[in-house]
Image (cartoon, rainbow, N blue to C red):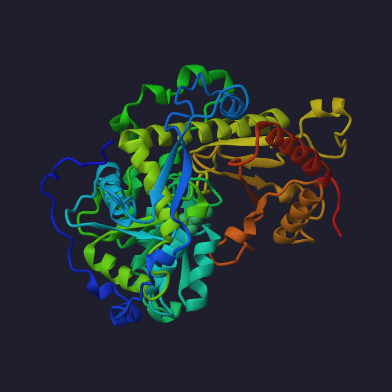
Amino acid sequence: MSFKSEAASFKPEAIDLSHHLSTIAKARQTSPLKGLPSPAYFPFSDISGSVLAANSFPVDRNEGTSSFSWFWNLFGGGKERTTSVTIPKYPTRLSTGLPQLQKIVKEYSDKVYDPAYGNYQTLLHAGNTDAWSKVVLTLCNPGDGVLVSKWTYPSAMASMRPYGMVPVPVDIDTQGMRSDALRTILSEWDAEARGMPRPRVIYAVPIGENPTGTTTRVARKKEIYQICVEDDPYFVLQEGTYVPKSQRARHTQNPAELDDEKFIASLEPSYLKFDYQGRVIRLDTFSKTIAPGCRLGWYTCNPMFAERLERAAETSTQAPCGFGQSLVAGALLEWGYHGYMRWLKALRLQYTIRRDFFVDCLVDEFHMTTAPGAMGTMWDGAQVYQGFANPQRSLTGYFSEKVSTTSPLISFVPPTSGTHVKIHFDQHPSFGTMDTETLEMKLFIALAEVGVLFGPGAMFSATGDWSSDKSGHFRISFSSAENNEMKKAVQIFGKTIREFMSTPQI
Ligand SMILES: Cc1ncc(COP(=O)(O)O)c(C=O)c1O
């Protein structure tokens, strides 16, 4: 039951980066006073929860081929295996509160991210959303630009814009932010023409970027490494390349064969792995691995940034909610490091199975071909799936004869996390008289009316500017729907898009 790390080998210390602090961050003061009421009057004498066994979900692909099998084991035929963890109001032998959780996350960062400098620190926060708003205020002043992928996580943009920080979009490809485009922007930066100084901060979502689901691989990360804020909720859920159904059994690694070290080595490493100067502020969250409602995560960064971020929390959120901390610490101590790794391996497998099933549904619904992505486009070099109206669908009675079967309706690159589907609006009869954003919104509404909710692509544009694109885009989540719902949603999507693409809009 140990989260202990081995003795650290020699690593350099972080360099002085205090010149990157914002005016607000420099001015932050220690909160002088804390009031603590008497714990005798706290109405909870303890907090307890039933924690699933760390091996509740299979890590063997052959056991976990359907998301129903575990569901059945858990809630149907099999008996749910849980342990009760209770955190007393007054600590007895060991407190499972804050100090232990701090220790666990530090040891997790040591082992899993293995930062390239020695004196990094970890600091608990209340989830990545809140952590990012604190970080951007710590690094930027109003009017500063932040380098972001052209399409990215909209809530991160929404939290910085009102403070006057400006997203500076960088072109993307199948690995997310392009390092050559980044280099060009920075080397050609004209502060006067742009109306802002050269940006110093990069906001990166290296795994499962929204809406594209891309993964930034290690060589690209090394090129991008600068001052980088790594918002990485999906690190352990890296789903790997989609392998078509017919070849899956032969070509997919079975996580059951991975011990903890091999599991960590199978993941694209964090920016921290080669951060030898303390330039990266990494944001981790328990939202995707335990529960979003616990509002809990942690920073891994150099001590100077950690100290300023602690000051920022001191006068706002203070520490993350103690109830959530206690229960998460209770579960992690119950499982131990090895158990938590076992839990994470199974989660990754479950999401991979869901991704595979979802892409299989698209492949079944459309007449699908694959072709290399066109040069110079976002999908340059990738294998692009193109979905045409499937003539076989006419047998089911809902195929619209008017829709073309020779031009693709949709395209996508099977994602390494999350799904992004491009809609070929240039095939739409109203294309030219109606802009793509309006067509996208109309298709979004048509889908919503028949009970299918996809995220419209326009919401993911870093700048809100969408006009240069001839296609529509949707982000489709497969994380929480069950297989039968996913299958049905894709069939409804197929029918709706065939009708939509053959009907002039007014
Ligand atoms: C890139 C990214 N950052 C942050 C979050 C939210 O994290 P948290 O629940 O820790 O605030 C999400 C997803 O919900 C996300 O996709």
Q: Residue furthest top?
A: 250
Residue 408: give x, y in percent of width and height. 70, 39
Query: Residue 253 location, x and y as percent?
Result: 42, 23
* Residue at the (69%, 28%) spot, across then down: 364
Lateral position of residue 419 relative to residue 402, left or right: left
Number of numbered discs overlaid on the protein picture = 0
Considering the image in quadrants, where does the C terminus appear?
Answer: bottom right
Confirm whether residue 256 shows in the render.
Answer: yes
Residue 300 placement, left or right of 322: left
Q: Position of residue 222 (x, y in %)?
A: 29, 50
Q: Most extreme residue toward the front, as rendered?
A: 40
Please report the residue visible at 51 percent of the width from the left and 44 percent of the height from the top: 375
Residue located 55% across and 37% down the image: 414
Q: In the visual, does 80 lie left or right of 137?
A: right
Q: Where on the picture, by quarter, is residue 316?
A: bottom left
Q: Nearer the viewer, residue 59 or 374?
A: 59
State whether residue 18 is above or below residue 65: below
Image: 65 above or below 493 = above
Name the quadrant containing residue 497: top right
* 357, 375: nearer the viewer: 357
Residue 235 seen from this side: no
Given residues 61 and 160, the one toward you in this image is 61
Q: Residue 97 at what x, y percent from top left?
A: 34, 54
Task: Please give the name of the residue rendered at 36% of the width and 33% of the height, measured from the top-left corner.
Answer: 339
Q: Quadrant of the N terminus?
A: top left
